[in-house]
Amino acid sequence: MSRFDKYMAIPFIEGGRDFSGVDCFGLYALIVATELGLPVPDPRVSFGRNGARTVLAAFAAEVARGAWIEVKTPRIFDAVRMSGFHVVRGEAHKSESHVGCYDGTGYVIHTELQTGPRRMPVEDPEIGPRLRGFFRPAVLLNLPLAA
């Protein structure tokens, strides 16, 4: 049994940020808030409502201001940045900012409209080619964390 099992039944809801429904970033933020009691920087944008350009620009601004730091070796609760497809106003678009949560044991927990929440190995053929990097929220930089 994994500490992350409680997140596997949450439905996908675009822009969702709580146990009633989450999008990919909402799931990440909910895990960190629930497990650590810490908020992560949330630009409050979503692919379905705002489109990929807006989301990518918001993320870039968060990185530029130091709210997120790219890391080479992930640890538990780091964000896993991936490419993904998102539906915006009825049309599918590929983007480079799908996000999941690294569980500290080689798995990523993420959610998508088509599948809902899943826990998958980072090396899985469905995840590995989509991997774009690992990011740590600045609020977690000085916390000693173990899986």
Image (cartoon, rainbow, N blue to C red):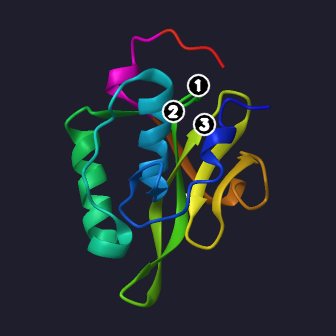
Q: Which residue is mark 2?
A: 78
Quarter holding the C terminus is: top right
Residue identified by numbered label 1? 75
Comparing 8 with 97, the one in front is: 8
- Which element type, helix, strand or loop, lies under badge 2? loop
Q: Which residues are magenta?
A: 136-143
Say which mark, if any, is on residue 102. Answer: 3
Kind of residue indicated by mark 1:
Arg
User: Viewed as shown, does residue 27 lie left or right of 15?
Assistant: right
Secondary element at image label 3? strand
Q: Pointer 3 and pointer 2: residues touching (CB < 8 Å)? A: yes
Q: Residue at x 25, y 32 (%)?
A: 66
Location of residue 47 with respect to 3 vertically, above or below: below
Q: Earlier in the sequence, mark 3 or mark 1?
A: 1
Q: Nearer the viewer, residue 17 or 128?
A: 17
> Mark 3 is on which residue type?
Tyr
Task: Calculate the distance from the C-alpha at mark 3 to the C-alpha at mark 2.
Answer: 5 Å
- The residue under the point 62% across, 73% down is 114
